[in-house]
Amino acid sequence: MSLRSRLVLTLGLTLLLFWGLAAAWLMRDLHQQVEKTLDQRLAQSARMVAGLMAQLPLDVWEQADRRALSIPPIEGLACQVHSPRGEIMARTHTDMEGILQAREPGHAYREEGGVTWRVFTYERGGLTITTADRMDERDQLMGNVLQVAVVPFVVALAGSLLALWFGVVRGLRPLGRLREALARRHPDALAPVATHGVPGEIRPLVETLNGLLARIQQTIVREQRFTNDAAHELRTPLTAIKTHLQVARRVEGEAARQSLAHAEEGVARLSRTLDQLLMLARVEGRLHFEDGEASRVADVAELALRDASASDRQRVTLPEAWPGEELAVPRELAITALRNLVDNALRHGPGQSPVELSARIDADGQRLTYAVRDHGLGVDEAQLEQLSRRFWRASRRQGSGLGLAIVAAIAERFGGELAFVRPEGGGLEARLTLPLMPRSAGPAGPAREGTPQGINDNDEGEPT
């Protein structure tokens, strides 16, 4: 069932129900009021006859003792007057003695010859006056009243249902236009849907749809960029590997071994680049990284140092103690981001110069900043903004050019940021700011001292 039919059916049945109840209530009250009015008319007629009889002269009374007076009949009414001795003194109809017989005062129903009468008996000055109405005439009068009241009611109800139909059709017309506009769009069209002239109730729907289209467009752009980046970055190592293998096939001895060694290096570089590309695609995608492990500040630093360059990680200097808070970032991504920063500083700083790793909590207590500083030559002010660009390198050293881009993507996804500054004394300092878990969300771990342990040969960081 369509939305239009459902609305019309629901509102129409509701309208019929409430109008029907209101009509039944009105008819009931109207019937009671008509009955009450007619009963009052009947009683008033008896009182009026009693008043007239009290004003008759004595000769009329003497004549009434010999024979009953004839009262002119009233349309729709019958009347009869009895003396204190029960004799009929006056009447309008000679054939209704059973109906107009004097009985208990008040209203009553009497039936004779298949006809029902409404009777009122009234006593005054020793006289008993009985008046009566035919119920079929009352019913006919009530039918006429109901007919006069029902016809406008039915017309108004029909008009209301018709107005309801046109109102629903007109009110849902913007949805029809939106459906037609979406049906006419090209499958590849991701432009926002126009909101001009859209009612306020539908505008949130259109805005949500536009947000969805924007996210789809961003996803397609990321996929295209990923494909272009992969094709661009993988073409060179593949060509180099192919060339070295061809050389190794044609020569012998030391030259062949060197060509194979170069090909092996190209394969390793290609493998690291693929790993970095896949990690970047996962970070920018909608995948979940939660593994149920707490992302404590000290644990992240310790595991990141384990994964750093094995030959140079002893150059890293650490603080005496780490903050005990927990990061609001999956541990895997936090470790990857910090490891890339440490690798970048170790790989592109001077040979034996130290790399300082520290962490501090911001003044608001909601974010933590890892600071990784080397003591190299640093970069120019104009190059600071280029450091997190994909495949951008500031030196000729080998590297995928994706390490810092991955760090920036991780920080952006979780509401953090990556910044680079040139501290006093030279070198370059990378500052990775990440959000912290609220203290009520989980217990804070004790302060731990991070010391590099173990070796895990991983991809190199981004050159600075």
Image: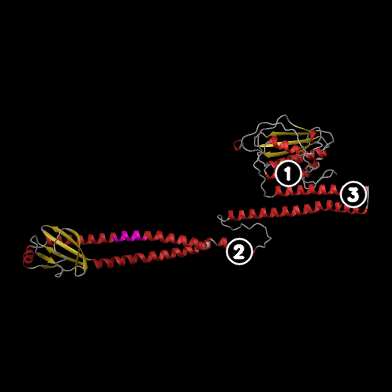
Amino acid type of the residue tagged 2 in the rendering:
Glu
**Location of mark 3 (residue):** 259
- Residue 446 vs residue 431, the one in the foreground: 446
Question: From this viewpoint, is residue 167 visible?
Answer: no
Between the C-alphas of marks 3 and 1, the distance is: 37 Å
Residue shown at the point (41%, 64%) measured from the top left: 157
Residue 4 badge = none
Please tell me which of labels 3 and 1 falls first in the chain: 3
Q: Which mark is residue 180?
A: 2
How far apart marks 2 and 3 lie (CA) works out to 64 Å
Q: CA distance from mark 2 to mark 1?
A: 42 Å
* Residue ID for mark 1: 408
Q: Is residue 311 shown above or below 44? A: above
Task: State left or right for residue 16 relative to residue 230.
Answer: left
Over which residues does the magenta segment extend? Answer: 23-31
**Whole-percent x and y of residue 138?**
26, 66
Q: Nearer the viewer, mark 3 or mark 1?
A: 3
Q: Residue at left 59%, top 36%?
A: 440
Residue 26: in magenta span = yes
- Give the residue type that dot 3 points to: Ser
- The colour scheme of the drawn protein is secondary structure
Q: Position of residue 134 (x, y in %)?
A: 22, 67
Residue 430 lies in quadrant: top right
The amino acid type, in three-letter code, at marker 1 is Ala
Note whether 199 is above or below 396 in the view shown.
below
